[in-house]
Image (spheres, grey):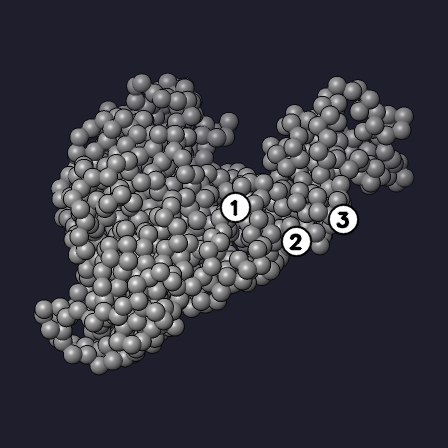
């Protein structure tokens, strides 16, 4: 609507309906009503197992091997920090189940309730085995901090509906009942944990502790083990810090296991417990946490958890998380493949055959940025592909948690400009980013978009020198390299299809200085709606609350789509605003044009953490950018256009 | 980019992330339900149940796909369920009447009121709108939805929504012009 009359009508109509239906709600009105009623979430669908069983017969204590009946890789979800109120959520979930409130909706959001009654399985053997001798190397003595009783355990993990836990008075250790955890259905590839929290961990900050317990197992198809999560602060991104000293598999008698660790200086609470991946049942008894001498050998120190855990998948998917988009059970799966590996015994296979465009399978691990902050870091891994019709990529990102909430991506490379396609043998791929000093977390992983098969193996992370060129896009502290006199340092190739274009600097065509930046579509060009950006991603702190103007010079040859200068803001509540001149009819660049000056003026909202700007091109063509400037302007300078909110 | 990461965190049980999502979409979900159910208390119930459905079903949501259409579909579903339970004629299901819109010329006359003239002022026109056109208008200007979203919510072809909205606005425009002519005449 563009006339005054239409504006009047719009306002009167809004007033009419506001009168009738009421004023808009307060932002938290819905949240307040529902936050106490959030029950369990629906299970993401199970990973289907690979066809065919193979491999040697399994023996307890072996490292991970194909298991009898065919491998069923566990769906490992990250060990999320358990909110202190986790127990009440689990109880609420039980109440919800008891009331039978769950119902199938028209969208097919349905639960499958397990109708078996709770309680220890009566046919379990009742013998009390005497404890096996403990490890050959005598353990150092410790001072008991806490003894964890069988009823001190909480069931956690995201899949509590398909596990049962409780106290087993028929399976005892040293005459005392044990706590058990059982996976209910053999169709579910799931994980769950018995958890207890050392909530006064700050008293032991920087100290060495041991978590130990006697564990017994029955028909554990994948693996189980003790675990601990260090630095479990509730507003931090999920990090799998848990380490299993020795994975427990199959059917084993009572045996003592222990995890030794040094707590970080900022430890506040430390969840410990027993994890069960996949089908089976485990019992735990005589669990305790002890304080050790500062010189006692420990398995995990805070410094040791900054490397990629299980980088070659020799312990399956332990330490990794993965998910589909969509979550549907058909179309894609992720499995551990012990027939195909770059090195060692296993790799991870991502496979899809019915995915629609835009659907993905993702594998990821998050580690602490810690020693990598402020350094140039390379992450590499090996990929092998078979008939990949979409894209197979690795990804590497650095982020920080904002004190007020929200996660800010500081740097990312997802190989958008160099994806793996088709069929190729094992090849190493590298990503290099400058990790900003304020980064708290690093994510690494692999993504398959579209159909095909890709295997990934042998992740590695290391610091490199400044002579190694960076890839991807990183947040810069100041606008830099605005005249492109040399290379594209400080600029990233982003957008929907950066791989459909070539990027370079061009010394033969410059507005000023020695060279300009050039983007040219590749031939053959895949689709009219492919677009890419040459983007600089800037820390917004100097510009918050101000009006900024980005100016640049553009030239084009045979642009059949549209091109233009753009300016974008990213805010902490998750929103983005962008003004992209290629979308404005009177300011876009099409066809063949000589150097022209373009500018975008925008107000930077208060909660903005980053600004990006650069060149956008959609469709085929060749376009140059040069002589950029970014400056604060007064409110007398008009804004270019109301910025459009961007669908993420 | 950040909505995808908020959704991913919420998918994994992160309630703080889910809170962010709820905040961002509270307005559109609440106003949509109010229009669909025409009753504030019912709408509140439906919106709350819808968000609980979203929480439960979020792990199966396709991160990277737009969230808003999915949310609106869940809201629509809850409104349907509530309307059926309460037997209120909240949402028309009659396909035949939509088909008729495109072909029956007398619709123009019914939109324009008696004698085919515009109403004497805008308020009279708004009060006299038939419920379906009022609903489309409200979803567009009160709940701030796109036309294709309105078409999805009301199970109507997009062209029908466009036609009805265009004709309703034309009626309102003429009625407002009339009102202003009368007012100017009085000065």
Q: Which mark is residue A110?
A: 1
In the image, taking residue B69 as reference, residue A70 lies left or right, namely left
Above or below A247: residue B3:
above
Mark 2 or 1: in front is 1
- How far across and down, in percent of the image, does residue A405 sit? 43, 59
Q: Position of residue A254 (x, y in %)?
A: 23, 67
Residue drawn at point x = 41 percent, y = 60 percent: A164
Q: Position of residue A237 (x, y in %)?
A: 35, 57
User: What secondary structure is marked by label 1?
Assistant: loop
CA distance for labels 2 and 3: 18 Å
Q: Secondary structure at mark 3?
A: helix
Whether residue A149 is visible: yes
> Mark 2 against mark 3, which lies toward the viewer?
2
Which of pointers 3 and 1 lies earlier in the amino acid sequence? 3
Frontmost residue, B53 versus A285: A285
- Relative to A646, does residue A518 appear above or below in the rendering? above
Per the image, the residue denoted by label 2 is B45
Give the quadrant of the C terminus of chain A.
top left
Mark 3–mark 1 contact, CB under 8 Å? Answer: no
Residue at coordinates 78% horizontally, 30% vertically from top-left?
B171
| Location of residue A561 by image quarter | top left
Residue A611 position, x and y percent, is: 40, 46
Residue B75 in the figure: left or right of residue A337: right
Quadrant of the rendering where the N terminus of chain A is positioned: top right
- Disc 2, SS: helix
Share a chain, discs 2 and 1? Answer: no
**Residues indicated by labels 3 and 1 sit on the same polypeptide chain:** yes
Q: Which mark is residue A20?
A: 3
């Amino acid at each position: 609507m563009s006339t005054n009359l239409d504006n009047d009508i719009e306002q009167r109509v809004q007033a009419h309906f506001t009168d009738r239906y009421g004023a808009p709600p307060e932002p938290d009105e819905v949240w307040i009503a529902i936050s106490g009623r959030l029950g369990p979430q629906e299970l993401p669908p199970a990973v289907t197992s690979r066809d065919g069983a193979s491999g040697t017969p399994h023996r307890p204590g072996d490292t991970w091997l194909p298991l009898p009946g065919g491998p069923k890789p566990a769906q490992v979800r990250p060990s999320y920090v358990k909110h202190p109120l986790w127990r009440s959520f689990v109880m609420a979930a039980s109440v919800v189940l008891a009331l039978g409130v769950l119902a199938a909706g028209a969208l097919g959001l349905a639960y499958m309730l397990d109708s078996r009654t709770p309680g220890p399985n009566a046919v379990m053997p009742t013998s009390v085995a005497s404890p096996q001798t403990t490890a050959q190397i005598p353990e150092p003595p410790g001072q008991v901090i806490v003894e964890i009783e069988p009823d001190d355990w909480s069931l956690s993990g995201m899949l509590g509906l398909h596990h049962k836990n409780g106290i087993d008075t028929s399976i005892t250790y040293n005459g005392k009942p044990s706590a058990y955890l059982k996976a209910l259905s053999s169709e579910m590839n799931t994980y769950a944990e018995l958890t207890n929290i050392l909530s006064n961990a700050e008293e032991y900050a920087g100290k060495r502790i041991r978590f130990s317990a006697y564990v017994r197992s029955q028909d554990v198809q994948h693996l189980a083990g003790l675990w601990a999560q260090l630095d479990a602060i509730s507003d931090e991104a999920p990090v799998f810090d848990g380490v299993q000293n020795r994975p427990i598999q199959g059917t084993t008698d009572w045996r003592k296991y222990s995890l030794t660790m040094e707590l970080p200086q900022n430890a506040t609470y430390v969840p410990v417990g027993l994890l069960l991946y996949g089908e089976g049942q485990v019992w735990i008894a005589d669990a305790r946490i002890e304080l050790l001498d500062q010189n006692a050998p420990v398995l995990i120190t805070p410094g040791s958890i900054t490397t990629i855990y299980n980088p070659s998948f020799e312990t399956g998917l332990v330490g990794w998380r993965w998910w589909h988009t969509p979550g549907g059970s058909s179309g894609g799966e992720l499995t551990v493949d012990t027939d195909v590996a770059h090195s060692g015994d296993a790799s991870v296979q991502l496979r899809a055959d019915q995915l629609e465009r835009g659907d993905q399978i993702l594998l990821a691990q998050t580690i602490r940025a810690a020693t990598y902050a402020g350094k140039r870091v390379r992450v590499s891994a090996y990929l092998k592909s078979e008939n990949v019709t979409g894209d197979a990529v690795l990804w590497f990102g650095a982020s920080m948690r904002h004190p007020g909430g929200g996660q800010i991506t500081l740097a990312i490379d997802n190989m958008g400009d160099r994806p793996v396609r088709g069929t190729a043998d094992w090849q190493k791929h590298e990503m290099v980013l400058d990790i900003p000093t304020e980064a708290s977390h690093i994510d690494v992983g692999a993504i398959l978009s579209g159909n095909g098969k890709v295997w990934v193996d042998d992740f590695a992370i290391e610091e490199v020198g400044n002579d190694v060129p960076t890839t991807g896009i990183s947040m810069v502290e100041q606008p830099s390299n605005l005249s492109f006199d040399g290379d594209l340092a400080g600029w990233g190739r982003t957008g929907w299809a950066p791989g459909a274009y070539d990027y370079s600097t061009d010394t033969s065509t410059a507005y000023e200085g020695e060279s300009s930046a050039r983007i040219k579509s590749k031939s053959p060009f895949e689709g009219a709606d492919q677009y890419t950006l040459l983007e600089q991603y800037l820390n917004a702190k100097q510009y918050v609350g101000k009006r900024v103007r980005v100016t640049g010079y553009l030239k084009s040859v045979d642009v059949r789509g549209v091109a233009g200068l753009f300016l974008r803001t990213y805010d902490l509540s998750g929103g983005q605003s962008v003004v992209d001149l290629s979308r404005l009819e009177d300011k876009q660049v099409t066809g063949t044009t000589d150097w022209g000056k373009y500018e975008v003026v925008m107000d930077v909202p208060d909660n903005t953490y980053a600004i990006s700007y650069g060149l956008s091109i959609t469709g085929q063509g060749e376009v140059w950018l040069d002589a950029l400037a970014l400056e604060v302007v007064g409110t007398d300078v008009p804004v270019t256009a109301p910025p459009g909110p961007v669908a993420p | 980019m950040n909505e995808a990461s908020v959704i991913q965190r919420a998918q994994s049980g992160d309630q703080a992330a889910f809170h962010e999502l709820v905040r961002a979409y509270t307005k559109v979900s609440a106003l949509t339900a109010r229009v669909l159910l025409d009753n504030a208390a019912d709408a509140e119930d439906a919106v709350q149940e819808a968000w609980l459905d979203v929480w439960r079903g979020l792990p199966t949501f396709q991160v990277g796909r737009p969230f808003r259409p999915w949310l609106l579909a869940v809201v629509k579903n809850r409104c349907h369920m509530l309307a059926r339970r309460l037997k209120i004629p909240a949402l028309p299901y009659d396909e035949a009447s939509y088909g008729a819109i495109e072909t029956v010329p007398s619709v123009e006359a019914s939109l324009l009121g008696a004698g085919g003239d515009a109403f004497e002022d805008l308020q009279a026109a708004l009060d006299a709108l038939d419920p379906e056109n009022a609903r489309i208008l409200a979803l567009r200007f009160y709940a701030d939805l796109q036309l294709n979203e309105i078409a999805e919510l009301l199970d109507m072809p997009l062209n029908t929504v466009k036609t009805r909205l265009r004709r309703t606005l034309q009626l309102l425009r003429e009625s407002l012009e009339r009102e202003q002519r009368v007012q100017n005449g009085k000065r």
